[in-house]
Image: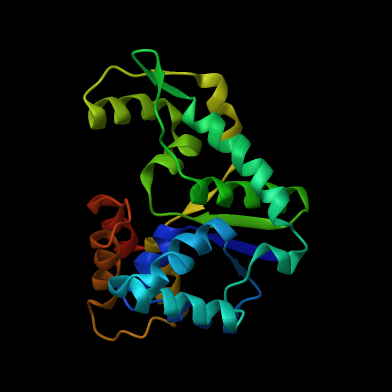
Amino acid sequence: MKALILDSGALINLSMNGLLYLIEEFKKITKIKFLITKQVKYEIVDRPINIPRFELGALRVSNLIDSKHLELPQSLNISDEEINSLTKKLKENANNSLESQGRSIQIVSDAEMSCLALSSILTEKGIENIIAIDERTTRILAEKPESLEELMSSKLHKKITTNKKNLAVFSKFRFIRSTELVYVAYKKGILKVNGAKALEAALYATKFKGAAVSWDEINILKKL
């Protein structure tokens, strides 16, 4: 069994671009489980369902859950308590990794860290998994932590110091973005967009809806 854990941003990106159907299409051709945590569900369904501007998007995701195209961890006998406990630890590690003027900087949310918590639990169970997350900060925690100090200093216009010991726990996680999901969908022939520029247009759309992907990365994907 393999699993793809989806963070809020990746699902919102797919929803805003009319691409949520890709989850259903992937389920038809793979045995991958598409998972979301309770924290992610709260961000993309439970809270926005009562806000007129976001209600339709929330309903779209809710329908995927009802049809079991998206599943909660309980489908694999993983409890909320187990995820919550590990989420708290990971969040404390991340939010105590950067400091400015003697104060810790809050850089991650419960939803993001719950995805990492679930990934860690799945790995312990021997289930290969990857996390779909569009936001840059959490990915840098794992993939290039040495760049985090520079990134946050530039963003906050403050001198930042890093606690490298706290960052070590994040090195084991693997990530993709909605951009790569769209690329794979195109290669699998399940992207329901025709034309010579179909791939290019879909990749651009993910960038404009929040995926932290560079133009150079998009150009590489277009040539693969």
Count of residue discs: 0
User: Would residue 121 appear left or right of 198 to someone viewing this image?
Assistant: right
Rendered location of residue 12, percent (x, y):
38, 66
| Residue displayed at 28% across by 17% down | 159
Please name the residue shown 47% across and 30% down the image: 95
Query: As rendered, which of 35 and 95 lies closer to the eye?
Result: 95
Residue 92 vs residue 123: left or right? Answer: left
Instruction: Farthest residue to the top: give it.
Output: 102
Is 193 displayed left or right of 3 in the figure? left
Is 108 left or right of 220, judged from the image as shown? right
Q: Is residue 183 visible?
A: no
Q: Quadrant of the N terminus?
A: bottom right
**Up-down: is 70 above or below 109?**
below
Residue at (47%, 35%) from the top-left corner? 141
Instruction: Name the quadrant of the C terminus.
Output: bottom left
Q: Is residue 214 visible?
A: yes
Q: Nearer the viewer, residue 109 or 161?
A: 109
Q: Is residue 137 above or below residue 220?
A: above
Residue 65 versus residue 205 in the image, above or below: below
Q: Residue at x 39, y 75 (%)?
A: 186
Q: Residue furthest front?
A: 50
> Which percent across, then down, holds residue 149?
36, 24
Q: Is residue 57 above or below residue 139?
A: below
State the image coordinates of residue 187 (x, y, percent, origin top left). 43, 74
Task: Residue 37: give x, y in percent of width and height.
Answer: 59, 59
Depth check: give the residue in front, 220 or 190.
190
Quadrant assignment, res 168: top right
Q: How is the image coloured?
A: rainbow
